[in-house]
Amino acid sequence: MVNFLPIDPNFQANRKVVGDHKGHKVWGPVNPPSKLGIHGENVAVDWDVCTGDGICIDVCPVSLYEWAETPGNPLSERKSDPVRQSDCIQCLACETQCPTAAIKITPPP
Ligand code: SF4
């Protein structure tokens, strides 16, 4: 079943950190390959909303995303991974253009 709910903008309050991946946190629940959680803090991608469209990778002016392979995931077999989130300049291009509203940009503390 396709999940059309957007990323929870309050995920950092509502979810627990369950791991780390390429320098960012992973917020649960996680139960691969079907449930993958949210990747990142100030640049966060909900991998259970991401359909692997890739517009974020195309529009990010600082190229901070990379593809991550997610074989067996029912939504898409690759996800956008915010591997250099500290480079974000808060332009919001990715958040506003994501077709499934999987991305939440938060100013760093
Ligand atoms: S807000 Fe702009 S700089 Fe930050 S991740 Fe999105 S596209 Fe890249």
Image: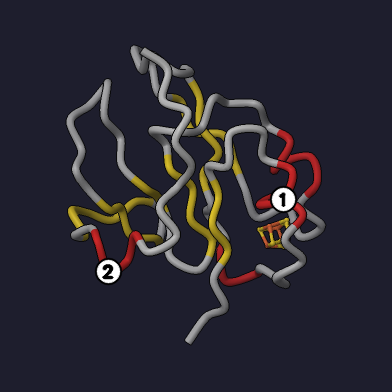
Residue 20 in percent (x, y) is at 28, 56
Give amino acid for label 1: Thr
Q: Residues within 10 Å of mark 1 (few under 14, many from 20)?
A: some
Horizontal side, residue 84 vs residue 63: left or right: left
Decide if ligand 1 comes within 8 Å of the CB at mark 2. Answer: no
Q: Is the N terminus in the top left, top right, bottom left or bottom right quadrant?
A: top left
* The one of 84 and 26 positioned closer to us in this rendering: 26
Residue 24 in percent (x, y) is at 39, 60
Residue 31 in percent (x, y) is at 17, 30
Q: Are marks 1 and 2 in contact (CB under 8 Å)?
A: no
Horizontal side, residue 89 vs residue 82: left or right: right
The secondary element bearing badge 2 is classed as helix
Decide if ligand 1 comes within 8 Å of the CB at mark 1. Answer: no
Numbered-mark total: 2
Marking on residue 56: none
Give amino acid for label 2: Ala
Q: Residues within 10 Å of mark 2 (few under 14, many from 20)?
A: few
Q: Which residue is mark 2?
A: 13
Horizontal side, residue 15 vs residue 51: left or right: left
Residue at position x 72%, y 50% in the image: 96
Horizontal side, residue 28 vs residue 99: left or right: left
Q: Which residue is mark 1?
A: 96
Residue 2 in percent (x, y) is at 42, 17
Relative to 58, does residue 64 appear above or below in the rendering?
Answer: below
Of pointers 1 and 2, the one earlier in the residue sequence: 2
Ligand 1 positioned in quadrant: bottom right
Inter-mark Cα distance, 1 to 2: 22 Å
Residue at position x 34%, y 59% in the image: 11
